[in-house]
Image: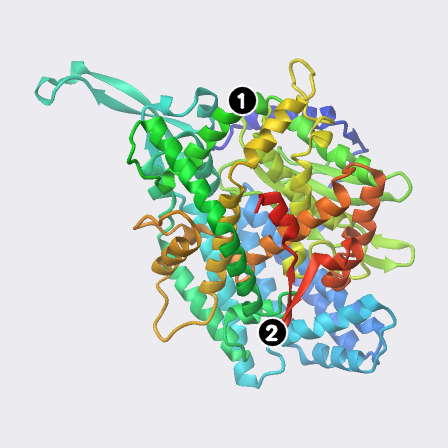
């Protein structure tokens, strides 16, 4: 999407304010002048330098303070303050460099991120801190379960940094960790900055109501035979430029089955082939230096799963269970293509998948995307977030006018989550529209974690919910239903952060074991499909009529047409991730052929030679050897939905169970104990040294 003019930005900002009002958000008094995200130090881009300096100075003071303490719970509290100080910089810099439209702010945030990361490496290898936590843990001075868990977690984190290794090995680990961070950053930057593009002619190949999402282009179209052509025999033909970032690519392939669009979209950025090779080698060397046989084992060891073998066995069993139904679905799609194209021997190609699946769903269930989107204007979807928190938790969102310098773009708005008895529970920034240079996906960013400051004072969490919905300056966005599902997914993460009430920010919200982290987000996806929820906010802007139950039933029936195909894809992604960061052979891995082989083995679809879609799969950076956690979380969330939420998803009793038994604890409790206490023992299964989810609820949902 092109950058908007100043007047267009102001126009859309005004429409966002109207959306907030339409959503029922009341407003509070204006805040005084401040800096970015409410940090006074960030009034200018160069403020990031002072932000880092202050964090280093404060953490050094705390290190000296801890060095003088006797074994006590105060050691954990002071170390948590170090974590809080450093994380405030890391999290703010990460959000800024991914979303700020001002290049100076992005550059300064990028430099700040690397500086504070280097300081974090120093802290992670600080023997004063390590010896203090060792002594406090061994002498049993922690009086609460959370304090004991915090001490153990901190010790394990130190040891993951190699603090217990000889000096030469520790220096090597520090070097590798820095290299891994830089490679991960380069991988993500390439994905954002080098998406590729394809021009589609004629523009009529894309439905008229979707054309505004793409840039118009023109070419000269000649008329007649070669020898008859001259300047008078030409005309301009309108086309559309498809920028093949992953989100736009997915949208485009729903409307046009095009080999070139697919090939370009799945062959960029080429530079990441080399970046990924280097990342695999660096992670493997790190794991071996730490005494593990692979990076996968190093990364998974602290999680519920505990080992690659446990996860791989789970994934392969699930792959085998879903294969027959996925093959049946593939044959149905191929038969449909043959009928539509009137070619009895037509083969199904990878670029056909979204196009023909979409066509089948529309033809069977008579779903018109524009009709569905009419019930999901952004203002109503924001109202839906309010419906959820008010029904479940008795809380409401209030819009807060931001101080000068607090916001990074006119589109951004800030909400407080307020409870009538408890006061404010936390704050959330919303940055919902696509723009040039912005992080291309949808994500939840923490800015500040919650923690206990005193018996009467709690540091409230601050988060940002970032999406990339398309809209012109004059038209308020209308969301497709898959966008609504995405919004609810990220909102699940935000609620995890906003509603957690942990003693330590080290455990706040989403700071949990990786294989349970995606559970709230997956759970709230179910809310986006439930008529009892949708009828509360999905309203036609023109008529005021709520979404018809018949339409919601059609959406659900459409969703359930090819569940095995989608599940198979997620299994493949997880196995690919574990394989890339698993045990390495004597020869360097060819990731392109490895991924192609895994696709052929674990999906019903063939791999197109010359493509390497995994070089834009940023989960390899953020979730290296951990992508399986999405499937773990889906199993957990499906069980929670069926056992706890489904009967009465908006009741206060359902909300109380969600908040009191799960969300408020963040990472402060052992995740397996938390899940069992919340739902019952059957939600997890002991498998050798680790834990796997019970899959019966998932199998029921998918129809296996």
Percent from the top left, x then y, of residue 501?
Answer: 81, 54
Element at badge 1?
helix
**Figure check: 15 above or below 489:** above
Residue at x-position 74% and y-position 40%: 646
Circle 1/circle 2 CB separation < 8 Å: no
Q: Is residue 135 above or below residue 476?
A: below
Q: Secondary structure at mark 2?
A: loop
Give the camera-side residue of 20 and 88.
Answer: 20
Which mark, residue 438? Answer: none
Residue at the disc numbered 1: 370
The residue nearer to you, when weighing 496 against 162, is: 496
Q: Give the percent coordinates (x, y) of residue 299.
A: 57, 67
Q: Position of residue 109 (x, y in %)?
A: 57, 53
User: Is residue 99 toward the left or the right of residue 591 in the image?
Assistant: right
Q: Please tell me how crowded label 2 is: few (under 14), some (14-19), or many (20+) other residues with Cα within 10 Å.
A: many
Specify the farthest residue to the bottom.
Answer: 166
Q: Residue at x 61, y 63 (%)?
A: 116
> Which residue in the structure is indicated by mark 2?
161
């Amino acid at each position: 999407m092109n950058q908007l003019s100043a007047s267009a930005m102001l126009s859309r900002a005004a429409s966002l304010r109207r959306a907030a009002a339409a959503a029922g958000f009341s407003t509070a008094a204006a805040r005084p002048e401040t800096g970015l995200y409410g940090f006074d130090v960030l009034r200018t881009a160069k403020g990031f330098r002072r932000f880092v300096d202050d964090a280093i100075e404060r953490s050094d003071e705390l290190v000296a303070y801890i060095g003088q303490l006797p074994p006590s719970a105060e050691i954990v509290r002071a170390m948590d303050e170090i974590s809080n100080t450093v994380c405030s910089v890391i999290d703010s810099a990460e959000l800024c460099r991914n979303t700020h439209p001002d290049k100076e702010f992005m550059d300064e945030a990028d430099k700040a991120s690397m500086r504070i990361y280097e300081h974090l490496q120093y802290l992670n290898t600080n023997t004063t801190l390590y010896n203090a936590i060792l002594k406090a843990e061994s002498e049993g001075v922690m009086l609460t379960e959370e304090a004991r868990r915090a001490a153990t977690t901190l010790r394990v984190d130190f040891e993951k940094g190699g603090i217990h290794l000889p000096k030469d090995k520790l220096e090597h680990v520090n070097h590798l960790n820095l290299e891994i961070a830089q490679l991960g950053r380069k991988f993500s930057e390439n994905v954002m900055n080098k998406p590729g593009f394809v021009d589609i002619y004629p523009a009529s190949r894309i439905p008229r109501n979707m054309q505004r999402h793409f840039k118009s282009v023109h070419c000269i179209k000649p008329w007649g035979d070669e020898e008859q052509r001259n300047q008078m025999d030409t005309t301009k033909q309108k086309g559309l430029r498809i920028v093949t970032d992953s989100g736009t690519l997915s949208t485009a392939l729903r409307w046009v089955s095009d080999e070139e669009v697919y090939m370009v979209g799945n062959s960029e950025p080429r530079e990441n082939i080399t970046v990924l090779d280097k990342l695999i080698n660096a992670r493997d060397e790190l794991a071996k230096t730490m005494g593990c046989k692979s990076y996968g084992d190093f990364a998974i060891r602290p999680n519920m799963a505990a080992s690659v073998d446990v996860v791989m066995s789970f994934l392969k069993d699930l792959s085998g269970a879903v294969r027959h139904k996925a093959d049946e679905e593939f044959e149905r799609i191929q038969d449909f293509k043959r009928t539509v194209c009137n070619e009895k021997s037509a083969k199904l190609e990878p670029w056909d998948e979204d196009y023909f699946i979409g066509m089948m769903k529309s033809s069977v269930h008579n779903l018109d995307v524009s009709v569905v989107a009419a019930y999901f204007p952004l203002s109503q979807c924001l109202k839906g977030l309010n419906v959820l928190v008010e029904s479940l938790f008795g809380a409401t969102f209030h819009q807060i006018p931001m101080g000068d310098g607090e916001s990074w773009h006119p589109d951004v708005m800030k909400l407080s989550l307020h409870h009538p008895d408890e006061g404010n529970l936390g704050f959330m920034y919303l940055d919902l529209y696509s723009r040039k240079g912005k992080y291309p996906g949808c994500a939840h960013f923490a800015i500040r974690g919650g923690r206990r400051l005193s018996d009467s004072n709690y540091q409230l969490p601050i988060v940002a919910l970032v999406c990339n919905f398309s809209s012109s300056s004059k038209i308020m966005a209308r969301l497709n239903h898959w966008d609504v599902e995405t919004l609810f997914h990220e909102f699940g993460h935000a609620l995890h952060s906003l509603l957690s009430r942990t003693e330590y920010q080290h455990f706040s919200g989403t700071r949990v074991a990786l294989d349970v982290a995606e559970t709230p987000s997956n759970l709230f996806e179910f809310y986006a499909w439930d008529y009892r929820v949708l009828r509360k906010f999905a309203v036609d802007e023109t008529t005021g009529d709520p979404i018809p139950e018949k339409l919601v039933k059609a959406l659900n029936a459409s969703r359930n047409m090819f569940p095995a195909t989608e599940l198979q894809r997620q299994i493949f992604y997880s196995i690919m991730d574990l394989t890339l960061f698993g045990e390495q052979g004597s020869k360097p891995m060819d990731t392109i052929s490895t991924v192609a082989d895994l696709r052929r083995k674990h999906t019903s679809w063939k791999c197109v030679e010359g493509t390497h879609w995994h070089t834009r799969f940023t989960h390899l950076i953020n979730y290296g050897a951990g992508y399986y956690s999405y499937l773990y979380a889906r199993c957990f969330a499906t069980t929670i939905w069926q056992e706890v939420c489904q009967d009465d998803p908006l009741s206060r009793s359902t909300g109380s169970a969600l908040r009191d038994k799960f969300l408020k604890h963040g990472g402060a409790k052992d995740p397996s104990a938390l899940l069992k206490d919340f739902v019952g023992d059957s939600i997890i299964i002991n498998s050798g040294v680790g834990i796997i989810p019970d899959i019966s609820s998932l199998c029921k949902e998918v129809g296996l």
